[in-house]
Image (cartoon, rainbow, N blue to C red):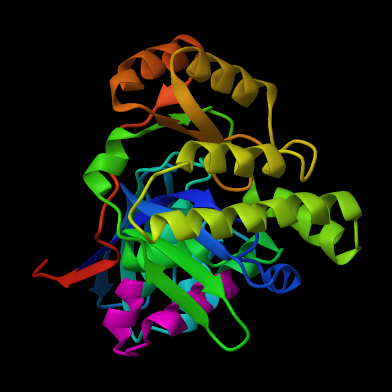
Amino acid sequence: MIESSAPTRIDLAGGTLDLWPLHLFFDNPPTLNAAIDLYARVSLKTRRDRAVVIESQDLGLKARFSSIKSFPEDHPLQLILRLIRFYKPATGLEITTHCQAPAGSGIGGSSALNIALNGALNRLTGNCYGRETLVEIAKNIETQVIKVPAGIQDYYSALKGGAQSIRCTYDRIINQPLPLDLKELTCRFVLCYTGKPRASGINNWQVFKDVVDQDKKTRRHLGTIAETSVSMEQQLLRGSLKNFESLFDSEWQARKKLAPGISTPEMDSLIRAGKQQGALAAKVCGAGGGGCVAFFVKPSARESVTSALESKGGRVLPFRFVKRGLSVSVREA
């Protein structure tokens, strides 16, 4: 049996700019995020026949296929099916998946599952793909599934863990760890799920089209996000959270103006409630339109902010920032 896991993430600044070619229009700014311990997990074992049996425990879905050749083109578990079809295992499989992140939470759950399953199938088939290749495989298959361009930041947090900067340049992707005390960082954040599933591809695709179509307002706000991510990277590379709340807030103020629906009334209500109880800044996770909101707080205000969010119907998700990325192990079934 092969078991694998990969973390999800909270994005700190520069999301959407990890979509090619958007970063090229803004002088290749960084995207910053930090991995959290809401893991996507995969267990995989071979069968004597050619059948493929899949169970998604968090989605409550089960499916059985007589062979890879019988996979349909469209299916609720098509991300998994497309990855199996790509790796072409020589035997039948039994695959069980579970993601601790709520569906549509905006913290990269599907990407973490993508990387975890890539890791397991890569080990099973002996392809020995390196990390950069795994990112390419994950990005291209997820793009097929969501039918719009996929960014790359989630794959790096899932692969490598920790806090990091991901910068797309002309000839390569530069990935730098950010020297932050993850225990301290955990004490400074509250993560709240609004209960509103969202589709990240929709908002990102609207922004993508507006930028390519030379929409001045969208380009101006995305330019502000790029400038903010550069400034935040400079601070975080020093291991400092100085001015973090103002930069985190600046990112959100620009982001919510990128497209209608990025911010929702529920999210606005939660952010107001959190700030009334001492939250210093807040920002939607991912592309917006629902999902999770991350609150930057003083450690002494975590409990009061948590209570305020729960009183407004928010679901506060316990988590820790973590150093560990993709983990793959083999054990006797």
Please indicate, yes or no, whether residue 94 appears anywhere in the rendered image.
yes
Task: Give how far across and how far down residue 139 sits, in percent.
Answer: 55, 71
Left or right: residue 165 compared with residue 96: right
The answer to whether residue 128 is magenta is yes
| Magenta stretch, overall SS | helix
Q: Give the tally of numbered discs.
A: 0
Task: Give how far across and how far down residue 14 sits, in percent.
Answer: 59, 56
Residue drawn at 48 percent across, 20 percent down:
314
- Which residue is more in the foreground, 58 or 26? 26
The C terminus lies in which quarter of the figure? bottom left
- Which residue is more in the foreground, 333 or 233? 233
Residue drawn at 70 percent across, 43 percent down:
254
Task: Give how far across and how far down residue 180 sits, in percent.
Answer: 30, 53
Left or right: residue 242 compared with residue 78: left
Left or right: residue 332 compared with residue 228: left
Please indicate, yes or no, whether residue 202 appears anywhere in the rendered image.
no
Q: Which residues are magenta?
A: 119-141
Task: Give how far across and how far down residue 144 sits, in percent.
Answer: 64, 69
Specify the quadrant of the image occupied by residue 229: bottom right
The answer to whether residue 172 is magenta is no
Up the image or down, 81 lies above or below 100; here it is below
- Which residue is more in the foreground, 18 or 242? 242
